[in-house]
Image: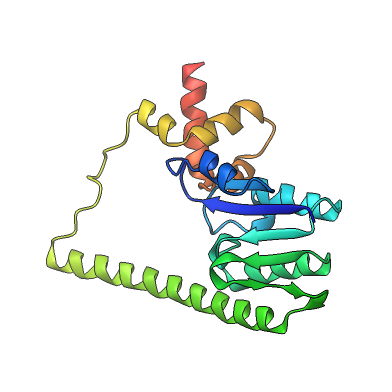
Amino acid sequence: MKKARYIRQSSQTQKNYRQLAIAHPDEKLFIDVISGSIPFAERPEGKKLIEAVESGVYDFITFHDLSRAGRSTIDVLTTLSFFQSKGVIVKIDNLGLESIVNGKINPIFNLITTVLSEINALERTTLLERQAEGILQARLRGSYVGRTKGTTDSTEVTLSKHKKVVKELKTNPHLSLRKIGTLTGVSANTVKKIAGILQSQS
């Protein structure tokens, strides 16, 4: 059985590659540093894993939890359904469940992952709504402090914050700003801003 483990983390500061490699020596690690809002099939390492599965390289894939596969219910279920259609066993660590048991589809896995995906999506929507309400109330009280209008980070700080964007712009200049934004988990406007900085420095 050829195993792979998919990991998604939001920032480069979570440097756990070495520990993960030691903890899971029998698994090939696919690690994306990207926003969870990016669909699984559009993430660099997610795309590589899909291609490897289509080529028959792996037949067992592990996720620590469902949120690593995506934030939206449809993205999570589409990803799991794809792996299932290829006969790949998917294991969710924190649930202790596998999608295929004794060569047969596990209906409990499908039921629980569907329900939990819906709950995760609902919780995120609720969180964003509460944040928006909190900001509104703070503004009404006059206590909300956002970034001072007109202030910006220095070019050095901006480039440091978006090292992955800088790398993509330098190594893949043929890609569109929107595509680079998708690959790196930032907006096209941010990519445009960084491209402008790099151009002014050249």
Frontmost residue, 44 versus 153: 44
Instruction: State the residue at coordinates (51%, 47%).
Output: 187
Answer with left or right where residue 109 lies relative to residue 164.
Answer: right
Q: Is residue 63 above or below residue 150?
A: below
Q: Is residue 29 visible?
A: yes
Snapshot quadrant of residue 128: bottom left
Q: Residue furthest right?
A: 55
In the rendered image, the residue lying farthest to the top is 202
Which of the 4 image quarters holds residue 112? bottom right
Q: In this picture, is 20 found above or below 88?
A: above
> For this view, does 138 lie left or right of residue 197?
left
* The one of 69 and 23 positioned closer to us in this rendering: 23
Residue located at (49% from left, 32% from top): 163
Q: Quadrant of the N terminus?
A: bottom right
Report x, y in % for residue 18.
53, 39
State whether residue 133 is above or below residue 7. Answer: below
Depth check: 40 or 128 in front?
A: 40
At x 53% / y 68%, what residue is drawn?
A: 94
Image quadrant in which you'd find residue 173: top right
The residue positioned 61% from the left and 49% from the top of the image is: 24
Q: How many marks?
A: 0
Q: Position of residue 123 (x, y in %)?
A: 44, 75
Q: Position of residue 116 (x, y in %)?
A: 55, 77
Q: Does the rendering let one see residue 181?
A: no
Q: What colour scheme governs how the chains and residues are painted in the rendered image of this protein?
A: rainbow
Q: Where residue 40 sits: x, y (%)?
A: 65, 57
